Image (spheres, helix red, strand yellow):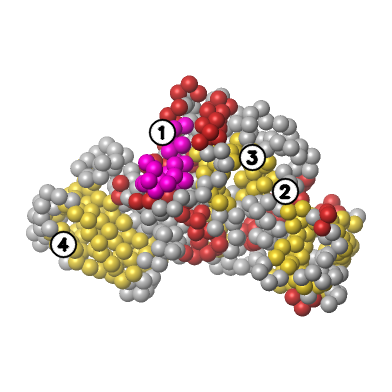
Amino acid sequence: MERMGSKETLCRTRTILCFLLLFCVSCKCSASEFEITQVASLGVDASSHLARKIPDTLFGIFFEEINHAGAGGIWAELVSNRGFEAGGPHTPSNIEPWSIIGDDSSIFVGTDRTSCFRRNKVALRMEVLCDNCPAVGVGIYNPGFWGMNIEDGKTYNLVMHAKSPEMIEMTVSLTSSDGLRVLASAAIRVPGGSNWIKLDQKLVAQGTDRTSRLQITAKTKGVVWLDQVSLMPSDTYKGHGFRTELISMLLDLKPRFLRFPGGCFVEGSWLRNAFRWRDSIGPWEERPGHYGDVWNYWTDDGLGYYEFLQLSEDLGAAPVWVFNNGISHHDEVDTTAIAPFVKDILDSLEFARGSAESTWGSVRAAMGHPEPFPVKYVAIGNEDCGKENYRGNYLKFYNAIREAYPDIQMISNCDGSSGPLDHPADLYDFHVYTGSRALFSMKNTFDNTSRSGPKAFVSEYAVTGNDAGRGSLLASLAEAAFLTGLEKNSDVVHMASYAPLFINDNDRTWNPDAIVFNSWQQYGTPSYWMQKFFRESSGATIHPITISSSYSGSLAASVITWHDDENSFLRVKVVNFGPDAVSLTFSATGLQGSINALGSTATVLTSGSVMDENSFANPNKVSHRSLLAFRSNASQ
Ligand code: AHR
């Protein structure tokens, strides 16, 4: 492989084989503008007796509610703090990001605890004081998450709950951020009475504005209570509430599992703020929401436990439910008192897997999914191995789940890569965030791991620090090298996922990430594109390789075969992590077919500088390129 415009180059070739014919191939990737100073030959022995199947689950994704990945991210809800609960249960409370339209003489807005919803009692009370109100009315507006993306011709579904002692006419509208440009508007009548009513209104946008807001206004004196105000675009993925374009980026990775919902998000800084599955299910209006005190933002929990299971199904990915084991960053439940937490998790599993007639399965069925969700993996906590009560609590969860669901694979937080665990587990979690050189070297990490015992789940890996920038080519090269090592060791490494997956550009809490988005745009960092090189690996066959070169310390490679309904493919992935251009010769023995030379392709991930990144302005600066100078001497 020859250098393609940078100090480091990743080259991959894919060769279509004609099924069951004799095979022989050699290829050379070349780019004439570079001076080639290194040579290497990569050989693969594709003999079946040396081949090994890669687990079906090897590469997946890890979704954490971090960086507004969910709220203001893949969850398409446009209203932030839709139930007015984010200011806390004590009233009067802060209603941010809601704001008031009108001055003190025309409107009085506050919160009280008169909501009809049992678990989220805070409601907004709005008293219109003006006789001669301004022409635009007075009321409240919500800017969503750094502005709502409202697009011309699209329909938005507004739902809100209201109560007013006297009939009151209101206007709901989508406007520009200053309220001056109206994109959609409708009159809504709240009938007088003592009961709350649910109001539905479709709003069709006549114009596009990426930073819009939702306004609820009135022009006549009166009092109205509002609660649980939702605005959803009508074009969510499969109607399931997910932002379609972000989901299609996930589908492109062909993830075999979805680990959720954290990460530290699961633990909480304090237990009282940890994710609670029970509070995140059922009708959205009845969910209390919670403040995620590790990543420091409020979530209405529209994206709850049920939605994560639905997302797994929509992606064709096995759900991996990471649950809190009674341990947060700052407090722990003693093992003698953990029983109710264990019961809580057994209930969560019944919710996912129980029949539609079971206590919790019936709740799932009522939400629209009578068929069980196939939860086969659970992680008992996140990064808690060193905590005082971890082992005690772990065993309580482990034993109870094993008894109730013998097929569920349980994941320990303790690292078993260099020695046996002191407790039973099916898999153990392995997290690594480090510099590029260190991660490149870690491609051999699992070479000496015991071949018996629990399997590794590398559930979080990434290059971080200076090498990573905001997602650099350099980082992705080291990560790719690391993944070739995981493929080779996939007899002991059964699952792996990059972290974090998403970042809203307006909340850059954790850097770098795989997918960057704002209200209307998205792009993959080089680490995202890198993962695409591995999307056919799960369930494929890996073959032993040899690299002959004085430069082999800077190279990493793997060779797999896989097939779709029509063809078999030989996929060669090569990472050049060093500064020199390399002329690479590739040869294969032991294949049971011949090459379809016309189908051969070479794809490169490279750029002018190793620190190059993608951006909204240049989303494909570092992305897949076909290598035109690829030469194949394949026999037909
Ligand atoms: O991926 C970001 C964080 O890194 C996760 O929440 C945590 O598990 C790890 O420390």
State left or right for residue 215 relative to residue 633. left
Q: Quadrant of the C terminus?
A: bottom right
Residue hosting label 4: 189
Q: First in sequence, mark 1 or 3: give its number.
A: 1
State left or right for residue 447 relative to residue 471. right
Q: Nearer the viewer, mark 4 or mark 2?
A: 2
Residue 599 seen in the current view = yes
Name the secondary structure under disc 1: helix
Q: Residues within 10 Å of mark 1 (few under 14, many from 20)?
A: some
Q: Residues within 10 Å of mark 2 (few under 14, many from 20)?
A: many
Q: Nearer the viewer, residue 269 or 411?
A: 411
Q: First in sequence, mark 4 or 1: give its number.
A: 4
Callout 1–callout 3 Cβ contact below 8 Å = no
Residue type marked 3: Leu
Q: Cα distance, mark 2 to mark 1?
A: 38 Å
Q: First in sequence, mark 2 or 3: give its number.
A: 3
Residue hosting label 1: 272
Residue type marked 1: Arg
The magenta region covers 342-363
Callout 2–callout 1 Cβ contact below 8 Å = no
Residue 623 spot, x, y in % from top left: 65, 66
Quarter of the image holding residue 192? bottom left
Residue 280 seen in the current view = no
Residue hosting label 2: 490
Q: Cα distance, mark 2 to mark 3?
A: 13 Å
Q: Quadrant of the N terminus?
A: bottom right
Residue hosting label 3: 427
Q: First in sequence, mark 2 or 1: give its number.
A: 1
Quarter of the image holding residue 380? top right
Name the secondary structure under disc 4: strand
Q: Cα distance, mark 4 to mark 2?
A: 62 Å
Residue type marked 4: Arg
